Amino acid sequence: DTAVSQTPKYLVTQMGNDKSIKCEQNLGHDTMYWYKQDSKKFLKIMFSYNNKELIINETVPNRFSPKSPDKAHLNLHINSLELGDSAVYFCASSQGGPQHFGDGTRLSIL
Amino acid sequence: SQQGEEDPQALSIQEGENATMNCSYKTSINNLQWYRQNSGRGLVHLILIRSNEREKHSGRLRVTLDTSKKSSSLLITASRAADTASYFCATDANSGYSTLTFGKGTMLLVSP
């Protein structure tokens, strides 16, 4: 009964491809997030959704498009993947307090 | 822009010793949180301290907050090998939706 689950855990793909990462939370939280963690472990917010509405979009290239079909799911679609997109992407959720994180999706671009 | 800066970047100690990590930030905050990240895993919330609090305890963890100096410290007492992980501070500037800005983290290695 994982609280925040992401799939896939690993994603290896070629430059120029389009890929999606899925996230689901069973905590009943209203707010969900996507973070990017680079090779130096720096974690940066990308998007935040509250009750399916976008509330934060932190200067992320428009190749990245989040989609929230309901408040328990926040998926991330990435078009035209570039080498610099290689990172670990984390999904998280919260209900105004501490955030609960998934175990991450390691994206490697060849 | 990056908010928190942890110090030191890496810390190596023996089991049973105490570990202290510091965090500095730049803008006003609503609360400050500390998270742990084990290798290959997601972040796990440890403790939250509000801007009107000065000290908070949770088990072997003690967090202090000095808003005049814009700094916080995390003390882990009687460390164990299982405490080996990266530790991040994160500041939340909003009182509504939680929007965290993370520091670069301190990598803690506890040797048996």
Image (spheres, rainbow, N blue to C red):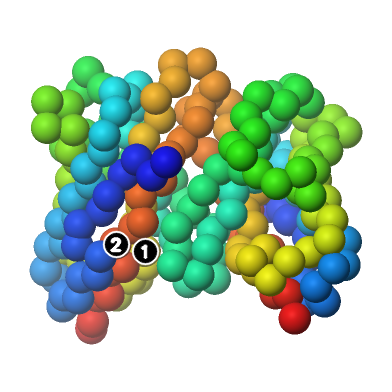
Point 70% across, 46% down: residue = A61
Q: Is residue A31 left or right of residue A12?
A: left
Hey, what amino acid is under mark 1?
Answer: Ser
Point out residue B13 in the picture as x, y percentages from the top left corner. 16, 75
Q: Nearer the viewer, residue B14 or B10?
A: B10
User: Looking at the image, can residue B57 be seen?
Assistant: no
Give the quarter of the image for residue B86.
bottom left
Q: Nearer the viewer, residue A37 or B44?
A: A37
* The C terminus of chain B - image quarter: bottom left
The residue indicated by pointer 2 is B106
Q: Please tell me which of labels 1 and 2 falls first in the chain.
A: 1
In the depicted structure, whether residue B91 falls above or below residue B62: above
Q: Nearer the viewer, residue B55 or B97?
A: B97
Point out residue A91 in the picture as x, y percentages from the top left corner. 65, 48
Point out residue A94 in the picture as x, y percentages from the top left corner. 58, 32
Point 12% across, 32% down: residue = B69
The residue indicated by pointer 1 is B86
In the depicted structure, whether residue B40 falls above or below residue B44: below
User: Looking at the image, can residue B20 be seen?
Assistant: yes
Element at label 2: strand
- Chain name for mark 2: B
- Chain name for mark 1: B
Point 29% across, 62% down: residue = B106
Q: For mark 2, does the 10 Å Cα neighbourhood hold few (<14), some (14 to 19), or many (20 or more) residues? A: many
Q: CA distance from mark 1 to mark 2?
A: 5 Å
Give the quarter of the image for residue B81.
bottom left
Point out residue B62 in the picture as x, y percentages from the top left corner. 19, 44
Hey, what amino acid is under mark 2?
Answer: Thr
Q: Is residue A75 left or right of residue A54?
A: right
